[in-house]
């Protein structure tokens, strides 16, 4: 089936389909943050550039300037990249929101602990009797 589809494709169609594969791979590397963040950014830039190229080819195909024969052509690489990018944005949004909530909660807990420790130290001072005796009081007892 794949060989039959490959025979039906024009050179432009082969480029279009290979762009989908490259975009999918680069989007996968971007989402998995492989092997580290700096290289994931490079994968994002490659995926973005190839997605833009595929979208331009698709626009030319729709306007009739480009021939993509074979199966119905849809820029699946662009769709995949857009979904990955949208999911990444959502993950970063929820991460930032969670970090803000954690910071606010930490601040509230620190204030509560500070208030509690101040209150506890005040109570301990009130309950502790004064045990200092002056020298005149000790002379009277003798």
Image (tube, helix red, strand yellow):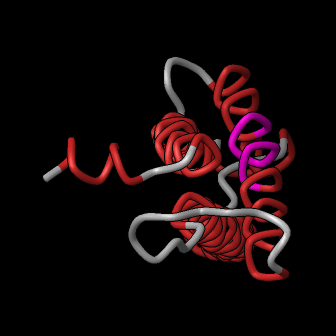
Q: Position of residue 122 (x, y in %)?
A: 71, 72
* Foreground residue among 105 and 61: 61
Q: Residue at x 79, y 37 (%)?
A: 45
Residue 103 visible, this angle: yes
Residue 32 located within the stretch drawn in magenta = no
For this view, does 8 lie left or right of residue 76? left
Q: Indicate the position of residue 138 as horizontal and vertical percent values.
A: 72, 43
The answer to which quarter of the image holds residue 11 is top right
Residue 114 showing in the rendered view: no
Asked whether 120 or 83 is in front, the reply is 83
Q: Residue furthest bottom?
A: 63
| Camera-side residue of 35 and 63 | 63
Q: Position of residue 13 (x, y in %)?
A: 56, 51
Q: Seen in the image, is 130 located left or right of residue 69? A: right
Residue 74 at what x, y percent from top left?
Answer: 55, 74
- Work out which residue is located at the far left of the displayed protein and give it: 1
Q: Nearer the viewer, residue 105 or 32?
A: 32
Query: Residue at point 54% right, 48% down?
Result: 10
Is residue 46 one of those drawn in magenta? Answer: yes
**Residue at the location (56% across, 58% down)?**
77
Total marks shown come to: 0
Please name the predominant secondary structure of the magenta segment in the image. helix
Q: Relative to 71, does residue 81 appear above or below in the rendering?
A: above
- The region drawn magenta spans 45-51
Give the quadrant of the C terminus.
top right
x 51%, y 66%: residue: 76
């Amino acid at each position: 089936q794949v060989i039959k589809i490959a025979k039906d494709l024009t050179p432009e169609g082969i480029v279009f389909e290979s762009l989908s594969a490259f975009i999918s791979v680069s989007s996968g590397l971007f989402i998995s943050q492989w092997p580290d963040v700096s290289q994931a950014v490079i994968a994002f830039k490659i995926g973005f550039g190839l997605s833009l190229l595929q979208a331009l080819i698709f626009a030319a195909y729709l306007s009739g300037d480009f021939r993509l024969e074979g199966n119905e052509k849809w820029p699946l690489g662009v769709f995949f990249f857009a979904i990955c990018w949208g999911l990444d944005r959502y993950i970063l949004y929820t991460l930032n929101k969670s970090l803000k909530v954690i910071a606010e909660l930490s601040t509230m807990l620190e204030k509560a602990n500070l208030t509690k420790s101040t209150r506890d130290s005040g109570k301990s001072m009130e309950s502790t009797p004064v045990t200092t005796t002056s020298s005149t009081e000790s002379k009277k007892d003798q």
